[in-house]
Image: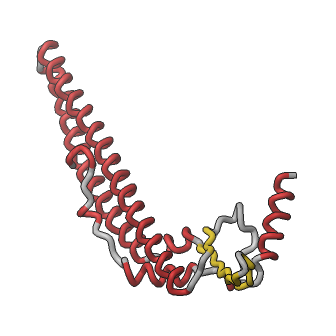
């Protein structure tokens, strides 16, 4: 029942705003309402900035993975050595070596967690910068073209999206012009990293 109600409301909304510009009487003045719909997900997926951010974060992720693999290889070698020494060492000496090995293993796990946290922070900060850049580009497009009502496209809310209301491509063009790249290396991570 709710879906039918939402569908009817959405359909009525589209019919009402079907004409991009229509007159609204307010305080005895005629005002023109210019409406646009922007698909933020499309703009984000297609933007040069998002692709640049993804490329840089992937490079960081590969560097981290390489670093972790190197440490894992070192730990495997240390484990093999420890197993060989088991016969040669006294129980106390072996327990001491095993404890040192466990400390190294724990440190590696912590390092993996730290690296994952760093990647997450990089993505988060870069995504916020991306959102700000999109908002700036959208603001410029709305001012230049005189839009005074812009909706964010969401398939759950706007069931039918007339192409003549879609301003996603101009926003994307403006975003690519203003912010084609973003330098992830300048991001200051929490915890001083």
Q: Is residue 55 visible?
A: yes
Tally of marks: 0
Looking at the picture, the colour scheme in use is secondary structure
Q: Quadrant of residue 137?
A: bottom left
Q: Position of residue 6 (x, y in %)?
A: 80, 59
Q: Residue at x 51, y 82 (%)?
A: 143
Residue 93 or 125: which is nearer the viewer? 125
Q: Residue at x 57, y 78 (%)?
A: 168
The reply, left or right, for residue 157 in relation to residue 133 is right
Residue 33 or 38: which is nearer the viewer? 33
Q: Is residue 163 visible?
A: no
**The residue positioned farthest toward the front in the image shown:** 28
Residue 62 or 150: which is nearer the viewer? 150
Q: Residue at x 53, y 80 (%)?
A: 142
Q: Quadrant of residue 71?
A: top left
Q: Position of residue 89 (x, y in %)?
A: 12, 19
Residue 57 or 108: which is nearer the viewer? 57
Q: Please say if 73 is above or below 101.
A: below
Q: Position of residue 105 (x, y in %)?
A: 25, 33
The reply, left or right, for residue 52 in relation to residue 185 is right
Q: Please say if 182 is above or below 115.
A: below
The reply, left or right, for residue 187 in relation to residue 27 is left
Q: Position of residue 128 (x, y in %)?
A: 41, 60
Q: Residue at x 41, y 61 (%)?
A: 127
């Amino acid at each position: 029942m709710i879906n039918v109600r939402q569908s009817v409301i959405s359909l009525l909304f589209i019919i009402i705003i079907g004409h991009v510009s229509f007159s609204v009487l307010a305080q005895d003045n005629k005002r023109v309402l210019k409406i646009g719909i922007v698909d933020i997900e499309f703009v984000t997926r297609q933007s040069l900035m998002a692709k640049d951010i993804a490329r840089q974060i992937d490079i960081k992720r590969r560097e981290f993975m390489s670093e972790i693999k190197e440490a894992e290889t070192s730990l495997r070698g240390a484990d093999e050595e420890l197993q060989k020494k088991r016969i040669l060492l006294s129980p106390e000496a072996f327990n001491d070596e095993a404890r040192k090995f466990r400390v190294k293993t724990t440190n590696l796990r912590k390092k993996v967690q730290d690296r994952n946290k760093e990647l997450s922070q990089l993505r988060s900060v870069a995504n916020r910068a991306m959102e700000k850049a999109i908002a700036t580009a959208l603001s410029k497009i709305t001012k230049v073209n005189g839009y005074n009502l812009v909706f964010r496209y969401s398939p759950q809310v706007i069931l039918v999206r007339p192409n003549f209301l879609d301003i996603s491509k101009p926003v994307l063009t403006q975003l690519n012009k203003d912010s084609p790249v973003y330098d992830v290396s300048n991001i200051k991570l929490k915890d001083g990293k």
